[in-house]
Image (cartoon, rainbow, N blue to C red):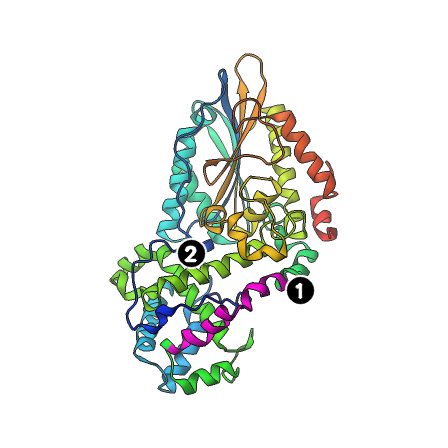
Amino acid sequence: MEKLKFRTGLFIFFSASFLFSSFKTDCNNIHWGTKTIYQPMQKVYTNQPEGYEPVFINYVGRHGARHLASITSDSILFLVLKDAENEKALTNAGEKLKRMDSLLLEVEKSNVSFISERGKEEQEAIGARMAHNFNAVFIGKSGNIKVSTTKKERTKQSARAFLKGLRPDTSIVIVNNFNDNDNLAFYDVAPAYKSFKEDGNWKMTLANIQNTEKAKKLVEVLPKQFFTSDFIAKLNSNFLHFHSEKSDINYNSKSFVAGFYDACSIVASIDKEISKAGFKPEELDFSSLVPCSDLEGLDYINAAEEFLLKGPGTDNNGIQVKIAAPLLVSFLNSTEDYIASKKTIADLRFAHAETIAPFASLLDIKGASEPISPDNIFDYQQVWKCENIIPLSANIQWILYKHKTTGDLLVKLLLNEKEAEINGLKDSGTNFYYKLKDVKDFYTRKLDIMNLHSGENVHDYLLNVK
């Protein structure tokens, strides 16, 4: 339910279960795409090679579970329901939906765009596990921890919660670098990506899913749960209209479905605030109003857009991946800086899903970087799962290990705290551990292909990359 902003044609598959009046409310198998609550994907790790210990960490993470990005009363769901109520066009289910949305407004009115209590817990727990798993980096050490964020307050909140869990020694200096747009919000800097987002050929590929008969049928059926036939006719004809100083838009069934899915997916992130407000979970259980099978379909369509717009899509060397090159340069440079000076022992960055997805693809992490042909788009989940790659608090960790006597250096990558295999790169003889020289050579070749070379201005690169 972002403010007057809709994903392109959010549809879900029509299900025969819509013919029944009661729906299953236990949708535990539903993944909410980018709003999936974070869980570490691995807890027991491969033993590090004998004689090695961790000495430095590069980190980039998405912000924690959050509240709505804009106030509910500005959302399409709220506005459509308000118009339907004024026209006495709500069914019994529509009345329930309207009440749930009103309660959501009450919960969210002072929390918009901030991370939730669950988000703080996610970040704090990741920081605590980092301190435990790689204690040699932090215990008894002096130096700096660099903390970088985007301009969004939720990334700064996430950084503070993470550091609370990390609990670095007081001898370690925290160096803040706020509003790091070139390395962390590159999608807002590059004109070519903005054009791709608005008019790229990914939209035609997504349309292959959107234009199935099942998807079209659902857009007809879902509103029937909540509105009278006359009101639905107005929705389908774009008759309903909203105008403000910032936006001028027509309501339709597609935008209503988008808003409904957003309401369903945000609830798990704000469960503690719901309880604190004095409400029971079932009072805001939007997903109980429709069958779980249809929510699964909506998740499938929604995640397909994320895959094409932010992930490897149909070309893992496309503009949506190229824009992450400055962040890779930052990882390489900070590793070299540590080797040269030992001054900064951890470089921690806090950003967004739009940062993590392309960076994971650029790094050639297995399961996060494989593209798929447009003809096979229906099978994209065989190579890329949104909930495993860019859930809330998603993160990539780059751990540098040093041999205590020889000084040899190894690198291990973690995606959401799971040991990552790098496609096309041979390990050191121990699974998931790679020689630093091989890592540098491998990624330098990738940067060369993307026409970003050492020492060049990354801001200029983003302005000119195609």
**Residue 77 versus residue 40 in the image, above or below:** below
Residue 376: x percent and y percent? 59, 55
Q: Nearer the viewer, residue 351 or 141?
A: 351
Label 1 sits on a secondary structure element that is helix
Residue 106: x percent and y percent? 33, 67
User: In the rendered picture of this protein, how many numbered marks are placed on residues?
Assistant: 2
**Which residue is drawn at the image coordinates 29% and 58% (left, top)?**
26
Q: Nearer the viewer, residue 381 or 158?
A: 381
Residue flagged by tag 1: what amino acid is it?
Asp
Residue 167: x percent and y percent? 40, 34
Q: Which residue is mark 2?
A: 32
Label 2 sits on a secondary structure element that is loop
- Relative placement, left or right, of 135 versus 197 is left
Magenta stretch holds residue 423: no
Main SS, magenta residues? helix
Q: Which residue is mark 1?
A: 199
Q: Quadrant of residue 442?
A: top right
Residue 169 can be seen in this image: no
The quarter of the rendered structure image containing the N terminus is: bottom left
Q: Quadrant of residue 281?
A: bottom left
Tell me the magenta residue range: 204-224
**Residue 130 versus residue 277 in the image, above or below:** above
Residue 242: x percent and y percent? 51, 80
Residue 307 can be seen in this image: yes
- Relative placement, left or right, of 77 versus 94 is right
Q: Nearer the viewer, residue 284 or 180?
A: 284
CA gap, disc 1 and disc 2: 26 Å
Magenta stretch holds residue 217: yes
Q: Quadrant of residue 206?
A: bottom right
